[in-house]
Image (cartoon, helix red, strand yellow):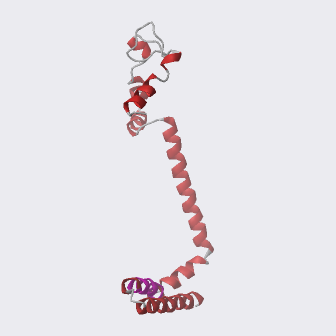
């Protein structure tokens, strides 16, 4: 009863504001305000407000919401654990079939520096004796070239 009265009052106030807006020759805004203000009274007349008010104070409804939240939390948690393990969907299917040896490690497909004959600290394309560290004078040579190119 109270919810229906409040919705009716909100609709009446909104229609009053729409009338004032139309009086100020802002017809598009007035039509939009009138449309918004008719929604609460429409919900009252269709019975939606009574239905929402009926379920809002039911303890069983709130228990249902809590159970839905717990289910969602379990879904999210299990998905996060699967992602941390790094298993893809195909790998999980292979594991279920018993083909655990068919699993391809993600790092196995990438070439390792040892396989290319380079040390781990070496730059790609560097000579075998060179390391990845730059000389003290070479640190800003690229930046200086860019600044000179732009005239700075």
Residue 84 image point, x, y percent: 52, 38
Q: Which residues are magenta?
A: 30-42
Residue 83 image point, x, y percent: 49, 40
The answer to which of 144 and 123 lies nearer the viewer is 144
The answer to which of 119 and 62 lies nearer the viewer is 119
Prevalent SS, magenta region? helix
Q: Is residue 12 left or right of residue 102?
A: right
Residue 116 image point, x, y percent: 38, 13
Q: Quadrant of residue 108?
A: top left
Examine the rendering and report whether any part of residue 133 can be seen: no
Examine the rendering and report whether any part of residue 34 can be seen: yes
Q: Residue at point 47% right, 35% down?
A: 86
* Identity of the residue furthest to the top in this view: 129
The answer to which of 43 and 19 lies nearer the viewer is 19
* Identity of the residue furthest to the front in this view: 151
Quadrant of the image containing the N terminus: bottom right
Residue 15 forms part of the magenta stretch: no
Q: Residue at point 39% right, 20% down?
A: 111
Quadrant of the image containing the C terminus: top left
User: Relative to 18, is 99 above or below?
Assistant: above
Q: Residue at point 60% right, 76% down?
A: 58
Residue 37 forms part of the magenta stretch: yes
User: Relative to 69, is 61 above or below?
Assistant: below
Residue 113 image point, x, y percent: 43, 16
Q: Quadrant of residue 61?
A: bottom right
The answer to which of 20 and 137 lies nearer the viewer is 137
């Amino acid at each position: 009863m109270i919810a229906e009265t409040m919705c009716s009052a909100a609709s009446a106030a909104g229609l009053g504001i729409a009338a004032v807006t139309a009086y100020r020759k802002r017809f598009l805004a007035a039509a939009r305000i009138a449309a918004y203000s008719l929604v609460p009274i429409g919900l009252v007349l269709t019975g939606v407000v009574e239905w929402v008010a009926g379920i809002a104070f039911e303890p069983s409804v709130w228990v249902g919401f809590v159970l839905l939240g717990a289910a969602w939390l379990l879904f999210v948690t299990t998905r996060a654990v699967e992602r941390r393990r790094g298993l893809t969907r195909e790998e999980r299917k292979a594991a279920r079939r018993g083909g655990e040896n068919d699993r391809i490690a993600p790092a196995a497909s990438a070439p390792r520096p040892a396989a290319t004959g380079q040390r781990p600290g070496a730059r790609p394309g560097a000579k075998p004796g060179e390391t990845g560290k730059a000389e003290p004078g070479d640190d800003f040579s690229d930046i200086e070239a860019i600044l000179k190119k732009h005239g700075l």
